[in-house]
Image: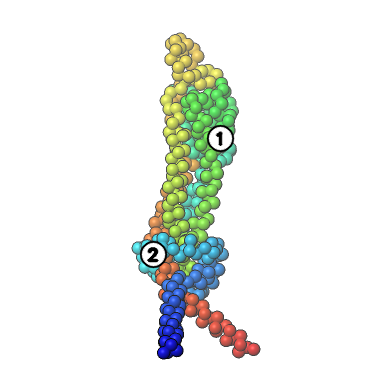
């Protein structure tokens, strides 16, 4: 009886163990089948996509960046990226509309790039260049018909001035020269107390921002080209081309708005009297003068007006144009393989079949 019990217990244990073991391995296999496959990511990053292998982006920078294959769980295969990638207004396999929208986004970036280059010219200290690309522009209208108007162009490193009655008439000063009040420039009265230094600090700080804005167009170019090819498009590229670009655009517009608040919108506007030596007279002193002193000492009164210069208009327009590229990226969804595990399995099998064929051909050659 005891031996029979032992046999029963051992057989029961074997049956239990036998039934538990397949169940454990079965669940593991199911998890493996549900897990996303990543060969398609590696192939796209390496420029070796097996889907429509003859069609691929024209150059290496247009392939998806290597960080996607290094950290796919962070940059590509997670619920947020897959959900964002699946959003769109056209079918994922509609190549015709994909190309049209990506080309539109690319064209808007090209226009923005050119406008940003124009805005970068405001870094120059050349008189002609600075006048044509100034971020803030001013004009003083004279009440004396014999005296020309005064023109001011404020860039990001200095100020160009066409002076009405002081030689040389065309001058360029750095902010340090311009903001320090002296009888030669009368700069304090162009702006009002303390405003000039605030504008100078803001303008100088924007030099690096403007250069970075120009450089960041290149990743946008590459993204637009990559997304034209559905066999190389990935969720990460759409996230960069839409949501990251949207955040960058909002921050840029906030920066340019800060410039407006620190510079031409707070400059002194109104009438400024000048004496016969060409020096600006503070309005407080002018109001204390007698009529005789005004007739003897005051040469002219200039009425100042300020507005956004060509450089600021260009950079704000370039920044606003990014919305075209952002919308185009949002409309175009990524291919279904980027979130469909069955298609990823099929792609893995396609790669395995190719490896088998290569091994077979090598064996036949031997």
Q: Residue at x 49, y 76 (%)?
A: 348
Neighbor class of circle 1 (other Cα within 10 Å; few <14, some 14-19, many 20+) is many
Vertical order, 198 against 101 (above or below): above
Neighbor class of circle 2 (other Cα within 10 Å; few <14, some 14-19, many 20+) is many
Vertical order, 209 against 237 (above or below): above
Q: Identify the disc placed on residue 158.
A: 1
Q: Position of residue 130 (x, y in %)?
A: 54, 38
**For this rendering, which residue is in front, 247 or 309?**
247
Mark 2 → mark 1, Cα distance in angstroms: 49 Å
Vertical order, 242 against 170 (above or below): below
Give SS at disc 2: helix
Q: Residue at x 45, y 54 (%)?
A: 244
**For this rendering, which residue is in front, 32 or 323?**
32
Question: Is residue 267 visible to the viewer in this orientation of the structure?
Answer: yes
Q: What residue sits right under mark 2 in the picture?
A: 86
Q: Position of residue 313 (x, y in %)?
A: 45, 42
Vertical order, 324 against 165 (above or below): below
Picture colour scheme: rainbow
Q: Position of residue 217 (x, y in %)?
A: 51, 53
The mark nearer the N terminus, 2 or 1, is 2
Query: Outermost residue toward the left?
Result: 89
Q: Identify the disc placed on residue 346.
A: none
Q: Are marks 2 and 1 in contact (CB under 8 Å)?
A: no
Q: Residue at x 51, y 72 (%)?
A: 39
Q: Quadrant of residue 364?
A: bottom right
């Amino acid at each position: 009886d005891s031996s029979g019990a032992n046999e029963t217990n051992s057989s029961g244990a074997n049956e239990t163990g036998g039934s538990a073991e397949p169940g454990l391995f079965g669940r593991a296999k199911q998890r493996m089948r549900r897990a996303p496959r990543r060969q398609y990511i590696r192939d796209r990053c390496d420029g070796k996509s097996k889907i429509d292998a003859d069609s691929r982006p024209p150059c290496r920078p247009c392939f998806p960046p290597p960080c996607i294959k290094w950290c796919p769980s962070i940059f590509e295969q997670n619920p947020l990226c897959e959900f964002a990638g699946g959003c769109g207004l056209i079918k994922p396999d509609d190549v015709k509309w994909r190309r049209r929208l990506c080309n539109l986004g690319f064209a808007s970036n090209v226009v923005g790039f050119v406008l940003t280059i124009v805005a970068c010219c405001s870094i120059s200290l050349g008189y002609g260049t600075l006048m044509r690309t100034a971020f803030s522009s001013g004009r003083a209208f004279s009440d004396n018909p014999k005296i020309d108007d005064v023109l001011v162009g404020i860039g990001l490193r200095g100020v160009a001035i066409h002076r009405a009655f002081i030689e040389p008439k065309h001058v360029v000063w750095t902010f340090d020269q311009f903001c320090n009040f002296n009888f030669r420039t009368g700069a304090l009265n162009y702006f009002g107390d303390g405003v000039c230094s605030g504008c100078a600090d803001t303008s100088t700080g924007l030099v690096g921002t403007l250069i970075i804005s120009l450089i960041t167009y290149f990743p946008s170019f590459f993204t637009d080209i990559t997304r034209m090819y559905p066999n190389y498009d990935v969720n990460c590229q759409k996230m960069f081309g839409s949501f990251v670009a949207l955040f960058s655009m909002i921050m840029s517009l906030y920066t340019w708005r800060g410039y407006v608040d620190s510079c031409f919108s707070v400059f002194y506007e109104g009438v400024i009297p000048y004496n016969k030596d060409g020096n600006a007279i503070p309005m407080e002193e002018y109001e204390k003068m007698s009529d005789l002193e005004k007739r003897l000492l005051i040469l002219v009164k200039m009425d100042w007006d300020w507005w956004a210069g060509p450089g600021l208009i260009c950079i704000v327009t370039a920044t606003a144009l990014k919305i075209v590229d952002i919308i185009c990226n949002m409309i175009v969804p990524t291919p279904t393989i980027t979130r469909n595990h069955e298609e990823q399995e099929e792609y893995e099998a396609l790669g395995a079949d190719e490896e088998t064929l290569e091994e077979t051909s090598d064996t036949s050659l031997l």
